[in-house]
Amino acid sequence: MSRFTKFGKRYRDKALGIVIPIVAILLAFVVGAVIILFLGKNPIEGYGLLFSGALGNPGRVAQSLMSACPLIFTSLAVAFAYKCGVFNLGGEGQFIMGATVTMMVLQVTGIQGVPGILLGILVGIIAGGIWGLLPGIMKITRGLNELITTIMLNYVATLFMNYIYSGPFHDPDSGNLQTPAVADSVNLIRVDRMHFGVIIAILMAVVVWYVIYKTSFGFKIRAVGINPTAARVAGFPVKRLVLLSFIISGAIAGFGGSVDLLGRQYRLMTGFGSGFGFSGVAIALIAQLNPIGSMVVALFFGMLTTGASSMQVGIMVPSAILDIIRALIIIFAVSGMALMKLPTFKNLLNRRPMDQEGLMPPATGDKKVEVSE
Amino acid sequence: MEEMLRMEGISKRFGTFYANRGVNLDIRRGEVHTLLGENGAGKSTLMNILIGLYQPTEGKIFMGGEEVHITSPAVAVEHGIGMVHQHFMLIEAMTGFENIILGSKVNPSALIEEAKDKKAIMELADRYGLEVDLDLPVSEMSIGMQQRVEILKVLYRGAELLILDEPTAVLTDQEVEGLFEILKSLTDEGKSVIFISHKMREVTRISNRVTVLRAGESVETLEMADTNGQELSDLMIGHHYVESTYKKVDGGKPVLEIKDVSYHPAEKHGGLKNVDLTVHAGEIVGIAGIDGNGQSQLAALVAGLIAPESGEVWRNGEKVAVFSPEDFIDQGLGNIPEDRNKMGLVGDMTVAQNLILKETESDRFSFGHGLWLKSKAIQEFADAKREQNDIRCTSVNQTARSLSGGNQQKVILARELDGDPEVLIAVYPTRGLDIGATNFIHDSIVAQRDKGCAVLLISADFDEVLKLSDHIAVLFEGEIMGQYSGENPPIDQISLAMAGK
Amino acid sequence: MDVFLGSMPDVLATTIRMTVPLLFVALGELFSERAGLVNIGLDGLMTIGAFTGFVVGYQTGNLWLGVLCGAVAGIAVNLIYAFCTVSLRVDQTVTGMAINILAPGIATFAYKVIFGDGSTLVQGTTMDKLAIPGLSAIPFVGDILFNQTLLAYLAYIAVPLCWFYFARTRGGLNFRSVGENPQAAETLGIDAIKTKYLASIVCGALAGIGGAFLTLCYTSTYATGVVAGRGFIALAAVIFGRWSSVGILGATLLFGFFDAVQIALQVSAPTVPYQFFAMIPYVFTIVALFFFNAQKGGPKANGKPYFREER
């Protein structure tokens, strides 16, 4: 058996993992272009403005990076939990709770400077973790479907934040529904034109990658995510691991909320964190739950967000077209991955003279008859 | 005798792999025709082609001399072909009645006409001696009754040719007798039966003719009257078959003692009632019995997955206080669980990862108790195990799911026997495996016994229990019905005990 | 509190009304799950239904055409779901999420294209109530039950129809078998793939109508977030109602009641921040599930992809 075939399939799968999302992105942009054309506008001009708006000068680049920062956190939250078989749709609520509690604690205690930043972030992480813990407890004790509970908790968190900025922490000097800005001294340190949080986010991606792929803990998390029964038989504390994954996932999102508050938004207001949870889901899925991939896709999404307004102003196409493009990217990406797994397609890919799979019947009788699964 | 079905030159390819190649089969009216072959010989594929679930890559099918194209299960039904699958194709949440009329066009009315349909079904049931309770949900039926529902299902659709896939595997001896009587009444009325089995005792008794399949090809078709079990076995595996035997031994000190344990004792098919059992060092205790009589619960108990409701479990003279798989594994438990895909392997992880599944925190495979996994050490270990256990795969980095059943079982065996466990539980260890893999597993288990391991073997395959066990206990409806020596066991007595007598 | 009790008939009438969108969607989900498809994209389907219903109703002045187009839009979007999950075997949850992201994107985009980027919402009209002669005159009950929009009556009529279909017809029995055990169903000549597509069409239509009800019988305008998680609450209602149409009616009435209560409380207790009342439906959904969750039950092959050899 040649070395080529021994490793060829693995490399091919890895390559597909990168090629498919790229193709999905291109396809989604093509569909977007068709829509723009349909409206009688010029898609090339539009996309030109989109990318120049996102990357045209250092200020824009910094803006894109800062837009990406919260998305990195929420996508990592989704990716981590999903590795353990937990579909956390509550990133938004956890993000909001993180930011809200950070804001409240800083306002009430009035702690300034770096201690304030550290305290703010710490309570944000804890708040997010608790908001993740709740659906976790519901799942492991009563088997509640986290898809439903996390969404419900998103609404509760949003309403709670709404109460905070329109009630007890309302900015008396503002006619808008918002809190006052946090003190300047607790703003995140700036690195060039962006805040330090971006670097934290990127480091976070590396840390999550390390935990998932390089530690025994991550190994167990993954095993539980794939086959909880086998994991339990192998002696893993399955419920504890599931609960931990909820908490860690929520904590990552809460962390993101604090960072976004202290680095970019400075205050809570209507729409704070809105859509970040679902964007996180989208990003994690496109990246096939790979933390580093999530970071890259999040950076791309951040770019789109920043460039969208330039495009809207330039060619008068609503920036919401990017929501459609983003959703199409997920659909194309996951469909693409699924397509590769379909038998007809597999056969097409495998029909190469060097391939040895013919000698390796797919488990004969009991396995290949997938009907029996 | 008149020909009913002829399959000519049937081939079926999956990717680059031929599950069937040039298979010929002909069935006469009113005969029981056995399809004999090892697991993976292509029996299921051939039958799935016949009932329209698969389309053949090549070949022709004739019914009553005319060529037919069975493009879907519905077409198979039209041609009077019906199959009783090994894993029953029943809907557990529905009643027997609902299962029987499901999808059928016998009564074309859009509404369910319960009284009318039931009458028709009961007539059939009486005619062939199929005793069923139509109003009972399938989930509450005994296995035997479920099988009768399956048979009624195909008869209701007017089947002339019935395919029974391993129908006796799940039945008690008495139920097997009942089934054979049903088969007789079917063939007496001119219906034909394709009987799939590898239990030679039954094959020689019930068959009119036998077609042997090997590695996807049909080897030969023989009149049962002109052949015998030995010849058929030889044809099936392709060389002279010699039954391996193992020396029976006496155990040492008691390692695992189960004392008067009960778990959901009211349940006949999922509980344990006052079980007393001792496994000594260096012996194999075999649990015989029909599937679903508490075997899963006994295995779960010994693996620490469930705690007894009453009674005690002792390990090495000490009472077990905490029932958790972690603790049991730490104390030296090896476990070959009953369902390798669901319980034994993390299918989407690699072979290598499955081999070190329980060891990720050990210094062998990680720094700092799991803080950094040593990929190289894992790779080397996996390659060594692959060599030792003859695990056939292109690379240890392919997913465990992609291996054949036998190789999957070898992965589990390699993992569980690593570090020589003090206690080994083997539940249905060779289910669905071919003779080669079966022998390998048996040899490994016996070798482990000889190293002093206390082995608890749970199997629905009576022959396997007889072959390996130094001591035999029979489980029936959660109770131990009797315990026997493995040396010259009283087979008739054990058979009766398995049926609760 | 007196104010609250005095408004009880109002609360009950509102309950009957607020139950309608949940009921439509939950019945849609019932069809989907009975064919083994857990569709969590209901929020998205409702959104597209709400938007399409509103736009068509507003532009043509024909609200029933709006309802119809809402249903068609729901079907169209749900066919994406069906194609991905059934034909491509993409994970159902993932696909549902994609729908939840796609549909609001389409709605928001199209809204801005049609109505511009103004900040004021375009006001449409809502359907007239249709008092049923005689019945609506019954004291107390009459005004609550029989003075609703025609669309609301249709939702309630759908319940016994669904029950009858699943319990009494061969088609319904065959349909259910696909959600329980598609392999078995296929061996009996039932086309599992076709059934799943059919289920998706019914689900898309009902969810679209449920969404259209929100804009055409409730808010009279389309705003982002109008669905407000009702798709997920309906998902909970299906579990809570134990996958039976009658159970779902009970569950959605309960959830509708809490929605009505929070609306009434916001009015009657202005001193308490309204946000806490607005949380009630969401918190209650969790509480209800916590105490009455069905870990088992439901179609056995729910959520699992079905593999059939390519023909």
Image (spheres, coloured by chain):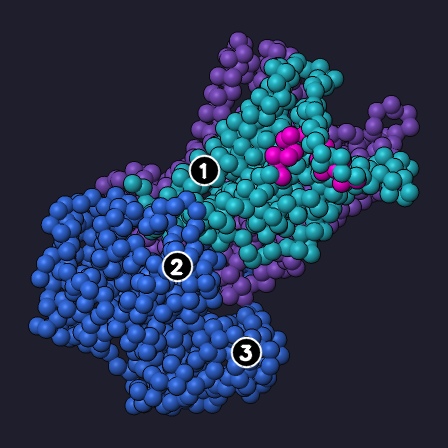
Chain colours: A purple, B blue, C cyan
Residue underneath mark 2? B118
Identify the residue shown where x is 79% and y is 39%. Answer: C139
From the top left corner, tell me how far across and down residue B421 is, in percent.
46, 76
Q: Nearer the viewer, mark 2 or mark 3?
A: 2
- Asked if residue C11 is positioned above or below residue A319 in the image, the reply reads below
Q: Are marks 1 and 3 in contact (CB under 8 Å)?
A: no
| Side of B264 relative to B45 (left or right) | right
Comparing B429 with B191, the one in front is B191
Kind of residue sitting beneath label 1? Leu
Residue lying at 62% horizontally and 21% vertically, measured from the top left: C63
Residue underneath mark 1: C198
Q: Is residue B471 visible?
A: yes
User: In the image, which is nearer the foreground, mark 1 or mark 2?
Assistant: 2
Which quarter of the rendering shows the C terminus of chain B? Answer: bottom left
**Residue type pointed to by label 2:** Lys
Query: Please, what secondary structure does the residue beneath circle 3 have?
Result: loop
In the foreground, B312 or C122: C122
User: Which of the numbered marks, if any, corresponds to residue B265?
Assistant: 3
Distance from the alpha carbon under mark 2 to that under mark 3: 35 Å
Which residues are drawn in magenta?
Answer: C140-156
Quote the CA–CA distance across marks 1 and 3.
45 Å
**Please, which chain is the residue tagged with disc 2 on?**
B
Rendered residue at 19%/75% (across/down): B205
Q: Do labels 1 and 3 share a chain?
A: no
